[in-house]
Image: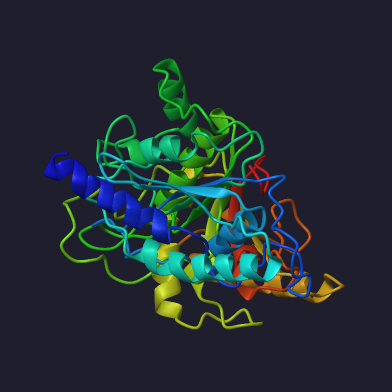
């Protein structure tokens, strides 16, 4: 055996030994039922695309992504891990669960694997220049079986290789429908995403030499990936926690994607979503905790609103936070929409081009705020705290 093959064998063996899921998984019968084997009858498999790259914060597994890993582990399924290098690295497939014939041993096996996965994923790094999410997703979705758990992607979404090279001229602001048409015509959509949910964490969050995205740029990036996943037969679900921090040191180079300082190319045929993590409202209020930072975010929308020339509705949405009545949340979300409107008017947008609404937690895009165990999760609730801008005739969910 050559030295290269031997080294590759050791790497794959090491990967198989540690790849698993995160935090507190119980995938078998209760611990008191010693002697009963883990249920192997309906395994559901998961793909994971993750690995630190030079244009995004160093990878960590957020709580909402851990939920998907946990669910796959409960079925004793497997996980396939792919690093989105310019040439995607398939790290291998390994069982998330256990084949133990005793329920307590099964629990212990799975907990061990769950403890390992966070550090394993955090240690993954790109080995080749540039970034290829499309190819990595395609690889991760292969052989998931007839009832897949889905594919978890952790990364910025700024691919810098063909056929979805955002470092190329203008692609970040391209019409999502045209992007899909091109990929379809060339037969380059992922082949195995039919019926698969792609859970994406950290889309649009960048670091290193990559210039931060404006709200219009982030919105169009999300719209492009949503359209690509949908065209391939899947569904895109954006996970709520933003990625932050610096890029890992010593990684292969990634070409920065040009971001227009003031974008006038916002596509008003779909909603423009501003996350609470960008606006930073003080909890349970309509006050910006950092008005200057919020103003900087909103300033990127001013020319696009003015160029649109049509009234834009600013709609606030809220988390449910286990409430049974939507009255207070509707009022809070309206006050937040009014605060955004006031800030935009202060930046020079004519008041006549802006109207406001608040829907609280009762709207088409509301997402569950409980984890797999049925426990309320503030991290999941955060995804429902947004302000959405829509032009006439465009719904909150596109």
Q: Quarter of the image holding residue 28?
A: bottom right
Given residues 201 and 195, the one toward you in this image is 195
* Residue at x-position 60% and y-position 57%: 73
Q: Residue furthest right?
A: 324
Judged left or right of residue 52, residue 111 is: right
- Quarter holding the N terminus is top left
Q: Quarter of the image holding residue 384?
A: bottom right
Q: How many marks?
A: 0
Residue 227, percent from left and from top: 53, 35
Given residues 305 and 317, the one toward you in this image is 317
Residue 58 visible in this rendered orientation of the protein: yes
Q: Residue furthest left?
A: 3
Q: Residue furthest top?
A: 185
What colouring style does the render use?
A: rainbow
* Residue at x-position 28% and y-position 31%: 162
- Quarter holding the C terminus is top right
* Residue at x-position 33% and y-position 60%: 206
Judged left or right of residue 352, residue 182 is: left
Residue 208, percent from left and from top: 23, 62
Residue 94, percent from left and from top: 47, 50
Given residues 193 and 395, the one toward you in this image is 193
Judged left or right of residue 9, residue 189 is: right
Residue 146, percent from left and from top: 65, 33
């Amino acid at each position: 055996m050559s030295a290269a093959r031997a080294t590759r064998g050791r790497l794959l063996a090491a990967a198989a030994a540690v790849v698993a899921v995160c935090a507190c998984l119980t995938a078998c019968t209760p611990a008191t039922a010693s002697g009963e084997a883990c249920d192997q009858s309906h395994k559901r498999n998961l793909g994971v695309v993750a690995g630190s790259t030079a244009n995004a914060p160093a990878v960590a597994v957020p709580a909402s992504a851990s939920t998907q890993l946990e669910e796959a582990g409960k079925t004793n399924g497997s996980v396939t891990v792919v690093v989105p290098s310019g040439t995607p690295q398939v790290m291998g497939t390994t069982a998330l669960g256990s084949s133990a014939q005793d329920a307590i041993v099964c629990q212990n096996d799975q907990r061990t694997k769950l403890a390992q996965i966070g550090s394993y994923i955090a240690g993954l790094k790109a080995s080749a220049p540039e970034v290829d999410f499309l190819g990595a997703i395609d690889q991760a979705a292969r052989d998931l079986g007839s009832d897949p758990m889905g594919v978890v992607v952790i990364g910025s979404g700024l691919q810098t290789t063909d056929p979805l090279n955002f470092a190329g001229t203008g692609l970040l602001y391209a019409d999502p429908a045209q992007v899909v048409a091109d990929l379809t015509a060339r037969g380059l959509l992922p082949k195995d995403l039919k019926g698969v949910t792609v859970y994406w964490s950290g889309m649009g969050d960048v670091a290193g030499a990559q210039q931060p995205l404006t709200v219009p740029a982030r919105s169009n990036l999300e719209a492009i990936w949503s359209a690509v996943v949908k065209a391939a037969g899947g569904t895109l679900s954006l996970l709520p926690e933003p990625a932050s921090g610096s890029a890992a040191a010593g990684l292969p180079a990634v070409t920065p994607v040009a971001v227009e300082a003031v974008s006038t190319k916002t596509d008003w045929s779909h909603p423009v979503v501003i996350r609470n993590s960008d606006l930073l409202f003080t909890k349970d209020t309509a006050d910006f905790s950092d008005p200057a930072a919020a103003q900087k975010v909103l300033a990127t929308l001013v020319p696009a609103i003015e160029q649109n020339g049509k009234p834009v509705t600013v709609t606030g949405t809220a988390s449910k936070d286990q409430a049974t009545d939507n009255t207070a949340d509707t009022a809070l979300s309206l006050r937040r929409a009014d605060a955004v409107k006031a800030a935009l008017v202060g930046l020079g947008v004519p008041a006549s081009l802006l109207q406001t609404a608040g829907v609280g937690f009762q709207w088409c895009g509301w997402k569950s705020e409980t984890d797999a165990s049925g426990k309320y999760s503030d991290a999941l609730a955060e995804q429902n705290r947004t302000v959405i801008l829509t032009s006439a005739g465009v719904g909150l969910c596109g």
